[in-house]
Image (cartoon, rainbow, N blue to C red):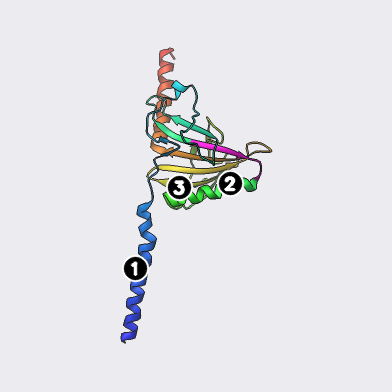
Amino acid sequence: MKKILSIIIFAVLATALIALVVLKPQSKFEKIEGAFGLKLGDVFDVTAKGTDSFTPQTPTRSFDRYFVHTTPKSRRIHHIGATADFSSKSDLEKERFAILELLISKYGPLDDEKRESGKGNQERPYSIYSSIYPNIIIEGSDLGMEMWSITRNNRRILVITGKPDDVTYRLGIDYDDMDLLNLSQKESIDIKASKAASEGL
């Protein structure tokens, strides 16, 4: 009887220890705040620079082009992105794996669903600004890209792979604030409405 009780106590303690090991790291994961020296939500005047590209103070090894999108009126950053091109799919996959491994260790596990835009996503439709195809909004069923996402508190990181032409394999990473993306779309509508009103339309 004592032996059975000891086994039960040991099993309970072992289960509790495993739970602590598994759950405790969750509290150590960082919030999604930004990347490449910029923070989502900060004011950044794109028009003053005349372009949506920027050069970070400390460029990363993985990327060589960097982009920022802001809300059109309040100039708050809602999107930060970067891309790099590769001549072979194997080199692209190696870099993608390394980046995902780093992101998971920093921000926690990927979302449950690996989103593949080429196959569509009718159950959970979404739109994104993508650094792979800058300056356009891409719907979930367009362009055959593959995406891996981490979402925390309405902020999202997307790692994206695509093939924009016959010889280029492109890797992109996007940091998005979904609340500010919605604000950006609202401000764009307001600007167009104001312009139409001023033109007497």
Q: Residue 178 has which mark?
A: none
- Residue under label 1, please give it: 16
Q: Name the residue furthest right.
A: 166
Q: Position of residue 63 (x, y in %)?
A: 54, 38
Residue 110 in view in this figure:
no
Residue picked out by circle 3? 150
Asked whether 181 falls inside the magenta stretch, the response is no
The residue positioned 49% from the left and 43% from the top of the image is 158
Rendering quarter of residue 24: bottom left
**Circle nearer the N terminus (1, 3):** 1
Q: Nearer the viewer, mark 1 or mark 2?
A: 1
Q: Nearer the viewer, residue 18 or 58?
A: 58
Q: Which stretch did the figure color magenta?
A: 81-88
Residue beneath label 2, please? 119
Cβ–Cβ below 8 Å for labels 2 and 3? Answer: no
Of residues 6 and 135, the one nearer the viewer is: 6
Task: Pinpoint residue 171: horizontal percent, then vertical percent.
Answer: 57, 41
Badge 1 or badge 2: first in the primary sequence: 1
Kindly check if marks 1 and 3 are in contact, taking CB atoms under 8 A apart as contact. no
Q: Amino acid at mark 1?
A: Ala
How dense is the environment of label 2, judged by Cα within 10 Å: few (below 14), some, or many (20 and up)? some
Which amino acid type is shown beneath numbered disc 3?
Ile
Indicate the amino acid at tag 2. Lys
